[in-house]
Image (cartoon, rainbow, N blue to C red):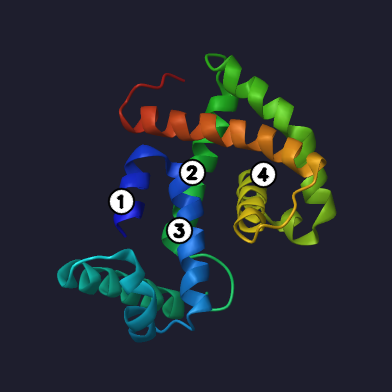
Amino acid sequence: MYISEQLKKKNIAEYLLYMWQVEDTLRAWGLDADKMAETYIPQFGLDASKSEELKGWYENLIQMMREEGVTEKGHLQVNKNILILLTDLHAQLLKSSKHPFYSAAYYKALPFIVELRAKSPQSQEKNELETCFDALYGVMLLRIQKKPVSSATANAVDHIAKLIGLLSDYYKKDKEGEVEY
């Protein structure tokens, strides 16, 4: 909760990846906030008030996951909404001639995005940015599990990460009214 608040202000892409990880963490704990309060939350070393606040945040997310039918897979609508905002911004940046560095990063990442979409039938139902976030999240999970990442995958993710990093920077600037189209 505290990390998510900071990330949302600082880096929307990292925030979205973090929230996907929170969704998976809640699933891993069987959507049981009480069990998390006993075993998981104490590892953060929070005082009783903050621990209770974090448990409440998890309970709210769990309730939303149940109501939205994403208890086993998928993402909360609030997270999908962020992806929609990023997708709209992405389209605006590509249409504008005022952001050549963004367009260049996109065209460098595009062959890797196309390749990822071709490899996964589920990716064909998703937009390009969701495919990018899926790739970043997948590699993040591999690294957390200390599993190897091939050099080809690392190269692809490097290009995708640069694109998403730029998009995140533009998102922050757009929120501050600093982006011209």
Q: Considering the image in quadrants, where does the N terminus appear?
A: bottom left
What is the count of numbered marks? 4
Q: Using the numbered discs, state the Cα–Cα distance from disc 3 to disc 4 in whole angstroms.
A: 19 Å
The residue most toward the left is 49
Q: Give SS at disc 2.
A: helix
Q: Which of the pair 75/154 is nearer the observer?
A: 154
- The answer to whether marks 2 and 1 mark residues whose Cβ atoms lie closer than 8 Å is no
**Residue highlighted by disc 2:** 13
Q: Which residue is mark 3?
A: 19
Q: Amino acid at mark 1?
A: Glu
Dot 4 corresponds to which residue? 128
Q: Is residue 71 left or right of residue 41?
A: right
**Whole-percent x and y of residue 148?**
75, 53
Q: Residue at x 52, y 65 (%)?
A: 75
User: Going by the image, does 82 lie left or right of 129?
Assistant: left
- Residue type highlighted by circle 3: Met
Task: Tell me which label, 3 or 4, sits earlier in the chain.
Answer: 3
CB under 8 Å between callouts 3 and 4? no
Q: Nearer the viewer, mark 4 or mark 2?
A: 2
Labelled pair 2, 3 in contact (Cβ < 8 Å): no
* In this view, 20 is above or below 177: below
Residue type at mark 2: give it: Ala
Q: Which residue is drawn at the image coordinates 66% and 51% (left, top)?
A: 139
Residue for badge 1: 5
